[in-house]
Amino acid sequence: MLGHVVAFPGGTAGASRLATVEQGFGWRGSNMAQAARDPFFWAALAVAAQDSICAFGRPNATDMCLRCHLPTGWLAMRSDPPNGSTMNGADFDGVTCVLCHRMIDPFFASTAAGTREGSDWSGYWDESSLSSTPSQDAAAATLAADEQQASMLQLFNGQPLYDASFQPAAGAGYDENGSGQYYVSTVAAARGPYADGSVPHGKAYSRHHLAALAATRARPALRRSP
């Protein structure tokens, strides 16, 4: 949500410390980490601004570019003017681990009910519930956190984003994210596809993130252990 920080704890220094672990080292050289430093991006941003001026008389369409390439600054409301000139420091870390692992499934209620992607918890979702943290218990905790946050979200016109059953109330045609849309949790716990495991930070089980690994889960060598 706007006004919330999704930068690495400690800013760029925190990103540097993360780079000493395996996941961070891989991220540091990735397109995600360079999303705001890539000179081709800034060239494309300039072209997009010119096209926006030509079509609409103002360069504001480039706000959508900044939303994905500099999400930390965009969420902190530093995208005005839309040329990136007010971005600073950790904003240029691009698409961080923190951003992706704070994302919320906008259709969390349907996913939790098993009506959006499937209710075959052991087959499709690969959940055994035999670990020290059963998947269903962990998913229920995440659902409760999602419901609490969803009740506070509003559209720009001040109307609630979700209805009483926690379904998006933005219109019947809204059935999938698009055009760089994303929802970010205000809770610092990192969301991920595993209910168990020991990590040096808060964590929350997320079927939203597990679904993103569907192609990976189809490969036996990379499939989760039962």
Image (tube, grey):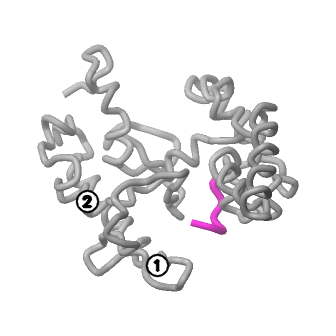
**Near-viewer residue (167 or 179):** 179
Residue occupying the far top of the picture: 221
Horizontal side of 176 relative to 224 (left or right) equals right
Horizontal side of 48 relative to 124 (left or right) equals right
Label 1's element?
loop
Is residue 4 a member of the stretch shown in magenta? yes
| Residue span colored magenta | 1-6
Q: Report how many numbered discs are placed on residues in the image.
A: 2
Within-10-Å neighbours for mark 1: few <14, some 14–19, many 20+: few
Q: Identify the residue shown where x is 46% and y is 84%.
A: 159
Quarter of the image where one finds residue 63: bottom right
Q: Identify the residue shown where x is 43% and y is 54%.
A: 177
Q: Identify the residue shown where x is 81% and y is 32%.
A: 39
> Which disc, if any, is residue 89?
none
> Which disc, if any, is residue 152?
1
> Which disc, if any, is residue 140?
2
Can residue 11 be seen here? no
In space, the residues marked 2 and 1 are separated at their CA atoms by: 19 Å
Identified by mark 2, the residue type is Ala
Residue 174 x, y percent position in the rendering: 37, 63
In the rendered view, tell whether residue 71 sits above or below residue 81: above
Closer to the N terminus: mark 2 or mark 1? 2
Horizontal side of 50 relative to 197 (left or right) equals right
Residue 61 x, y percent position in the rendering: 70, 57
**Near-viewer residue (137 or 182):** 182
Identified by mark 1, the residue type is Met
Quarter of the image where one finds residue 46: top right
Of circles 2 and 1, which is in front?
A: 1
Residue occupying the far right of the picture: 85
